[in-house]
Amino acid sequence: MTPNCHRCGGGLTQSDLFCPSCGAPQFRFAPPEEAEGSYSAARPAGSPARLHGICWRDALTAALMVSAPAGVLSSLSILSWGCCLWVVGAAVACIAIYHRRAPAFFLETRYGFRIGAVAGLIAAYSFVSATAVWRVVQRYVLHQGEAIDSIYVQVIQQSTALVQSNPDTQAQWRAYVHFLLSPDGRAAFTLVNSATTSLGIVFLSALGGALGVRLVAGRKSKLGEA
């Protein structure tokens, strides 16, 4: 179909930007398919469109795959010395898995920090839950309650030895120790200890997420140079 000038109705060709009769500029509207085709042709071959932000579905899936086991490993007494390594390593692995599952999204340090923090929340929840279950098993299945209580009392006594040199604080400290040795005091101590450890796990995991972005981005640049 031959286009016509919107002002004088004169005939135009497909390449005319101005009417040859009256000189009026002509407006052209490309269909969505044509516009997309032009955009695809303008991009280099093999380079998909990149998106900013975070694909949280893939991020949560990756976090659950590695952070939950890391939290459980950190709760085991024989492996708890490597808690920092489990948490940071899990966050780095989470970023690597997320990048494989959502390659169309840009990897930035701020996104890695956020994904790592979410992975840390999952790891902290797994850590607290697994620790609670393990303590129940130790006390009621393995009958190690006396050993657990003796370790707790020993920690309190060591702390008491540090303040014996100050007579002004001894009376207050004795009352505090009496509270800590009560069931309510032990519950409060366990709650505070769990909250502090959870905050540390989230912080380390967030740093691990940022580190994972740097490592993955560095590996991509080396592959590109090769």
Image (cartoon, rainbow, N blue to C red):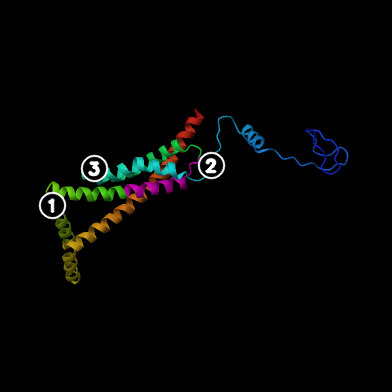
CA distance for labels 1 and 2: 54 Å
Residue at 42% of width from left, 46% of height from top? 115
Q: Which residue is mark 3?
A: 79
Percent x, y for residue 128?
27, 51
Question: Callout 2, which amino acid?
Answer: Leu
Residue at 28% of width from left, 48% of height from top? 127
In magenta, the rendered stretch is 105-124
Question: Which circle marks residue 51 in the picture?
Answer: 2
| Horizontal side of residue 89 vs 222, given as left or right | left
> How many marks do you count on the picture?
3
In the rendered image, the quadrant that contains the N terminus is: top right
CA distance for labels 3 and 1: 20 Å
3 in relation to 207, above or below? above
The reply to whether callout 1 and callout 2 are in contact (CB within 8 Å) is: no
Instruction: Residue 21: say if magenta.
Output: no
- Taking depth in this image into account, of 152 and 105 the one nearest to the observer is 105
Mark 1 and mark 2 lie on one chain; the one further toward the N terminus is: 2
Question: Callout 1, which amino acid?
Answer: Gly
Q: Which residue is mark 1?
A: 145
